[in-house]
Image: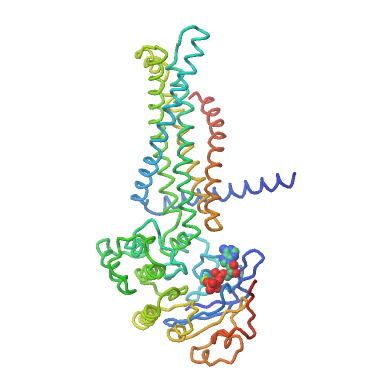
Amino acid sequence: MFKELGRLLIRFFTQLGQASSMVYSCVFWLFKSPLEFSQTMQQTTKIGVESLVVATLTSLFTGMVLALQAGTTMRNILSEPLYIGTLVGFSLVRELGPVLTAFVVAGRAGAAVTAEIGTMQVTEQIDALHTLGTDPIRYLVIPRLIAFMIAIPVLTLCANFSGMFGGFLVSVNSLGVASNVYISDITTFIGVDDLMHGFIKSCFFAFMIGVVCCYKGLWTRGGAEGVGKSTTQAVVSSMVLILVLDYFLTAILNSIGL
Amino acid sequence: MIEIIDLKKNFGPKHILRGVNLKIEEGKTLAVIGGSGTGKSTLIKCIIRLLEPDGGKILFNGQDITHIKSQIALAKLRRSFGYLFQEGALFDSLSVGENVVFGLKYLTDTPKSEYAKIAKEKLALVGLKDIEHLRPSELSGGMKKRVSLARVLATEPKVILYDEPTSGLDPIMSQIINELIIDLKNKLGVSSIVITHDMKSAFEISDTMAMLYEGKVQLCAPTPEFKKSQNPYVKQFVEGLSKGPIQMQIRN
Ligand SMILES: Nc1ncnc2c1ncn2[C@@H]1O[C@H](COP(=O)(O)OP(=O)(O)OP(=O)(O)O)[C@@H](O)[C@H]1O
Ligand SMILES: [Mg+2]
């Protein structure tokens, strides 16, 4: 039992070390060589487009269900559906928007990134990059990392809007809230600091997903089976880490007043 | 030009290279033969540091390259080399044309406007025409191999490491590739190591031949001598006899 735990810890720290050294190489090459601009743009659009529909749909329905739950609860307690817009808006902007979007992107684009880099690893394409004068960090990892860091905050913004729109639909159509009341509930209570709170979170999630998925891809071993394994691991690790990171970020951001 | 001294490489408990000694002269071709899984690919991967050797030295122009640590110095070292992968290793996210000119951007100062011309030219050298726009997944095995060779040739390296350049090719195409390798040596003074299972081609293209067996060089000699060698291991391998000192394990 202790042996198992020890082995797990060792594996965790080895992987953490390897991933950190990858991040270090990224920083190193970022300053030493020109950015692969076209690669970066291509990846950004790919990640963005791939996840846009799923991300907006997910948060649309999340906004709808939030409004529905909040509305019925409020009606039971206060006999009137009050502050639905505020509730929906707060939950989305500070919490659900960033987290759900990160989940969707990890499952969609993150998995694709790991599978692609992993396949390149097992078919010696990564070695070929070395022999042709470049480097997987420069050619693959940095563009993808930047792409995630652009795409995820933008997608989060889209998700926030579509979630609030979902809440709007339910509030106005089935709860009987006046549309201007719902909107003013949002605009009077949600400020720039709440938006910043969500934005900072989504940037951290993006960085983490990029690092985990590229790392798992680069360290793929063992043929097609290995690719499958590392893809699953990348998605699962990303999702767990999103939730862990979310707690700590919330604690830190709250303590500095955001 | 390249001198390999007592090179060792393990994969976990498996000792693949157990002290390999070899020498490649400038402008000459060394053919390396040996059974499947004896570590031929491993050997040439160590030379360009795709694998870290576990012991020994590799001198390139007199400098030991096994201790280079910095990424930049490694990249610089690899500039002198071309490496033909056994399985091609074409980038499947790029078209054939983009694959061929891939290295030019990083290894040379060739202007972008020349890329299309170079791609066409190098593909023609390996007997391929009008396939620049195809994806690697649309090619046959032998075509992939040749596109991969064109990619190596595009950057005009001084040293080329070929991992089975003619495997999977028909006899005529094999001969064309053999002549290409000889041409590169004669016209451009390219030094090379060729791994091959094709004895006829080995005899034809090489100046020196070496046989790898159980992690060591069994015999390294100038090709005419190697051909006539009475070394029982070499003789059995060259003649392809199932009976002899080399016992291949076959599982039932
Ligand atoms: N990454 C690796 N991890 C573990 N073992 C490996 C690895 N790469 C190669 N090996 C082992 O090293 C040995 C030599 O492999 P290598 O690819 O060099 O053989 P080879 O001489 O090129 O054979 P072939 O003629 O079939 O290409 C094999 O037994 C293989 O199992
Ligand atoms: Mg091999």
* Residue B103, image x, y percentages: 37, 63
| Horizontal side, residue A233 vs residue A104: left or right | right
The answer to whether A79 is drawn above or below residue A110 in the figure is above
Between A39 and A235, the one nearer to me in the picture? A235
Q: How is the image coloured?
A: rainbow
Q: How many marks?
A: 0
Between B25 and B214, the one nearer to me in the picture? B214
The answer to whether B27 is drawn above or below residue B13 in the figure is below
The answer to whether A184 is drawn above or below residue B195 in the figure is above
Between A208 and B129, the one nearer to me in the picture? B129
The answer to whether B152 is drawn above or below residue B188 in the figure is above
* Residue A214, image x, y percentages: 49, 49
* Residue B162, image x, y percentages: 45, 74
Quadrant of the rendering where the N terminus of chain A is positioned: top right
Between B202 and B67, the one nearer to me in the picture? B202
* Residue A186, image x, y percentages: 40, 18
Q: Quadrant of ligand 1?
A: bottom right
**Residue most toward the top?**
A79
| Horizontal side, residue A221 vs residue A128: left or right | right
Q: Which of the 4 quarters of the picture holds residue B140?
A: bottom left
Q: Is residue A182 visible to us here?
A: yes
**Residue displayed at 64% across by 70% down:** B15
**Residue displayed at 48% across by 45% down:** A111
Q: Is residue B40 visible to us here?
A: no
